[in-house]
Image (tube, rainbow, N blue to C red):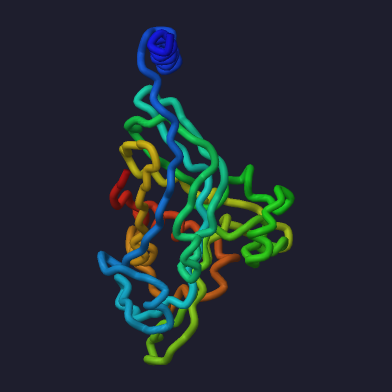
Amino acid sequence: MKRILSILIILQLLIISCDNDGEVVASQAQVTLNFSHNWDGTKVTVADFNSIKFTNEKGNELSIERLRYLVSKITFTTSNNEKLALTGYNLVDLSKSETLTFVPGGTIPSRTYKNLSFTFGFDNEDNYAENGYADLNSASFEVPAMLGGGYHYMQMDGKFLNSSDVEQGYNYHAIRAVDNPGNPTFPQDTFFEVNLGEVTVSTNSVIHIEMNIAEWFKTPNRWDLNILNQSLMPNSSAQIMMYENGQNVFSLKSESP
């Protein structure tokens, strides 16, 4: 009798694990994203903050005192172009190690996907304080109403040695490009989709995403902090330049099961 029961259980499991065409259905996996950072290949952590030790493409020597940015709409694309979106968003903050690991809500089938993507910042549909982002509010990540409201995409702050060799502050803040403060108009969307390419997802997959911070100052716009250092939020041209430079900032570092 026990043997018959065992055979029945095995048959039932086989049925459950197959779809109507007799193909095996992939197991569901939860994905973990790890975010790391470098400056043209040299690892950057919070231990490197507050010291003028970086040089951008224009030759400006600078420090980083704060770096935090928003990622949302984590999406996996199958070989058949089906898009599987996980839920949630993450405010990555280099000064808070717990934010460097993010587990989006939901699961996806274990398989190889032709692309992993995410949105840098929020798209226009999500970029409203009314959506109830209490954590972003408490982190003072909002954009003033006179500039259209919503939230920053990134805040990078520090100091640089100006043309007089004197330390001066900079605030490299990315938001939705805006004109006419107080009665804002929006000449161009400046959130963007980051496409990282093929990934293989299995049970308890960890996907490593890396930001090359130097790229924010490099391609295609060689950023001169002597000219563009502060008051960049109401400067739509500067915001569009940030958008352009951000296209090559992120890469897929490695994967581990």
Q: Is residue 22 above or below residue 59?
A: above
Q: Position of residue 199 (x, y in %)?
A: 32, 39
Q: Position of residue 180 (x, y in %)?
A: 67, 60
Check the picture and name the quadrant holding the C terminus.
top left
Residue nearest the viewer, comparing 109 with 181 = 109
Q: Is residue 80 above or below residue 84?
A: above
**Left or right, 139 with reference to 172:** right
**Left or right, 21 with reference to 230:** left
Q: Is residue 185 above or below residue 155?
A: above
Residue 11 in view of the camera: yes
Q: Position of residue 58 (x, y in %)?
A: 31, 73
**Left or right, 88 with reference to 212:** right
Residue found at x 44% / y 25%: 82
Residue 184 lies in quadrant: bottom right
Residue 177 lies in quadrant: bottom right
Residue nearest the viewer, comparing 76 with 17 = 17
Residue found at x 43% / y 82%: 50
